[in-house]
Amino acid sequence: MQVKKWLIWGGVAFVAYFLFARPADAADAVRGALDTVFNAADSLAQFVTSIA
């Protein structure tokens, strides 16, 4: 349990550092992740539509 807690806090610290040190790169990473999610949702919607 203690290792999991340290890993979570380490991840939070890394994200915070990344946001403050390189905000433009952090924004690009978030934008890319959101684009991936939206593309996957769109593909799923097209699949379900083609079934019906």
Image (spheres, grey):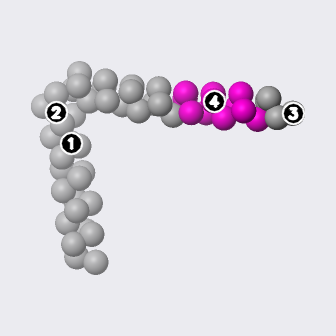
> On the image, numbered disc 1 is attached to which residue?
16
> On the image, numbered disc 2 is attached to which residue?
20
Residues under numbered marks 1 and 2 in contact, where contact means CB atoms less than 8 Å apart: yes
Q: Amino acid at mark 4?
A: Ser
Task: Quadrant for the C terminus, please.
Answer: top right
Task: Quadrant for the N terminus, please.
Answer: bottom left
> On the image, numbered disc 4 is attached to which residue?
43
Residues under numbered marks 4 and 2 in contact, where contact means CB atoms less than 8 Å apart: no
State the residue at coordinates (23%, 53%). Answer: 11
Q: Quadrant of residue 6?
A: bottom left
* Marks 3, 2: nearer the viewer: 3
Q: Residues within 10 Å of mark 1 (few under 14, many from 20)?
A: few
Of mark 4 and mark 2, the one earlier in the sequence is: 2
Label 4: which secondary element: helix
What stretch of residues is rendered in magenta?
A: 38-48
The residues bearing labels 3 and 4 have C-alpha atoms spaced at a distance of 15 Å
Of mark 1 and mark 3, the one earlier in the sequence is: 1
x, y percent for residue 5: 25, 68
The residues bearing labels 4 and 2 have C-alpha atoms spaced at a distance of 34 Å
> On the image, numbered disc 3 is attached to which residue?
52
The residues bearing labels 1 and 3 have C-alpha atoms spaced at a distance of 45 Å
Q: Amino acid at mark 2?
A: Phe
Nearer-the-camera pick, 37 or 19 = 37
x, y percent for residue 43: 63, 30
